[in-house]
Image: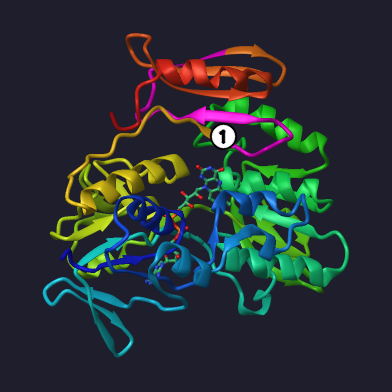
Amino acid sequence: MTAPLTIVGTGMAGIGLLRQLRALDVERPVTLITGDSGDDYAKPLLSTGFAKRLPPERLAARSALEVADQLGAVVRTHTRIDAIDPATRTLHIGEERLSFGELVLATGAAPAVPFAIPDTLAGRVFTINDLDDYRAFHAALDGLGRPARVAIIGAGLVGCEFANDLSAGGHRVSLAAPEDAPLPRLLPEPLGHALGEAFAEAGMELHLGRGLARLEEAGSDIGVVLEDHSAIEADLVLVATGLRPRIELAQTAGLDAGPAGVQVDRCLATSVPGIYALGDVACVDGVNAMYVQPLQASAKALARTLIGTPTPVQYGAWPVLVKTALLPVVALPPLRTPARWRIEGEGRDLAAYAEDEDERLIGFALTGGCVRRKVELARAAPPLLG
Ligand SMILES: Cc1cc2nc3c(=O)[nH]c(=O)nc-3n(C[C@H](O)[C@H](O)[C@H](O)COP(=O)(O)OP(=O)(O)OC[C@H]3O[C@@H](n4cnc5c(N)ncnc54)[C@H](O)[C@@H]3O)c2cc1C
């Protein structure tokens, strides 16, 4: 009989893997362990719920109990793994020692907050990276009983999607970031400016090109003080300053891991036999994409490996679709610095081609009406992991 399998994490990677495994093997004993409620939900929906005024329960497809029942697994919720001991093949949960046969780390990524949040602002400054966070922010908005003034720090994918969503939900949004244009990691500046214009036209206040100096109490408001001493007054602050793979468990257990994630090969195997990783926590052969399509491909490949058919994962040229309805954005960021960005189009309908020294396409970014070219361009671009 195959060894029992333990999966740490019930995000899209952990539950996705179990779903793929059950399509191939209904017998194997599986335990899922998670530090949160274990609800099965699609994380990308978190930044679409405020426009539609969706309560948190509408975002959860299934409870942990239903997951356990439908996928034939033991699910332990609100249970944090403190350490992994690869020598004795045990997990440490407080005083408890739980042995594992094979282990999969699907622990995701945590918000990186690069500044101090004063204790007096607790309950008014948020990050939203899971359903529990959404619950807390939703309750704070509800508690105000009126449209809120929300300051968002950070203009990457998460910051921009929440800016669009909260603005569409009737809230007054200010967006602050040190870069000169939104989506700096996905878009060359002219396309970022087009998105910024669309945001400003919708009534958002943009405070770009200035980092945050500090957060402070300002009467009943929060003062968001920027480096140039200007200040935004807000009811609530949403911090969207990036995510970091949760590598601590792996690192302290002696697995190869670094800032880009837990290092795994194409079969999602870590440096310790019988321990695997996938999703936002995993850096697969040098690539940590942190999007849904790569983790779905990984779940499919790993399920086959776990039933005894070693299966390397491949990623295609999968562009990111940014959920900014005010100006649709699609991007396939190049894996290395391009020799040039060639930009075509008019107004906010722009196409930017990242090219190498030989004028080969190595990535692209599209806004407005040009997003319809995504399929054609993705066919011409190199895969993320070929
Ligand atoms: C707002 C937002 C919008 C997004 N939109 C898109 C999009 O439109 N398209 C797209 O492709 N991608 C999008 N993404 C990215 C995508 O959602 C993630 O890549 C994906 O959900 C990551 O899933 P995961 O299972 O790897 O990690 P997570 O969902 O973070 O799950 C991690 C799990 O590990 C558990 N865990 C962690 N540490 C421990 C521990 N010590 N003990 C026990 N359990 C632990 C957690 O409780 C959780 O269950 C978005 C992300 C965000 C934040």
Give the residue at mark 1: 321
Up/down of 366 relative to 250, above or below: above
Q: Is residue 339 magenta?
A: yes
Quadrant in the picture for residue 26: bottom left
Quadrant in the picture for residue 311: top left
Image location of residue 19, percent across then percent down: 40, 54
Up/down of 26 relative to 79, above or below: above
Image location of residue 322, percent across then percent down: 59, 37
In the image, 104: left or right of 15?
A: left
Report the residue that reaches farthest toward the bottom: 95
Quadrant in the picture for residue 343: top right
The disc labelled 1 sits on which kind of residue? Leu
Tell me the quarter of the image containing the N terminus: bottom left
Q: Is residue 81 magenta?
A: no
Q: Is mark 1 within 8 Å of ligand 1?
A: yes
Q: Is residue 353 visible?
A: no
Return the residue nearer the eye: 57 or 178. Answer: 57
Up/down of 240 relative to 81, above or below: above
Q: Secondary structure at mark 1?
A: strand
In the image, 273: left or right of 68?
A: left
Image location of residue 97, percent across then percent down: 25, 84
Report the residue that reaches farthest toward the top: 358
Give the magenta range.
321-343
At x 56% / y 34%, what residue is drawn?
A: 321
Return the residue nearer the eye: 102 or 347. Answer: 102
**How many numbered callouts?**
1
At x 81% / y 73%, what residue is drawn?
A: 220
Image location of residue 201, percent across then percent down: 81, 34
At x 28% / y 28%, what residue is drawn?
A: 386
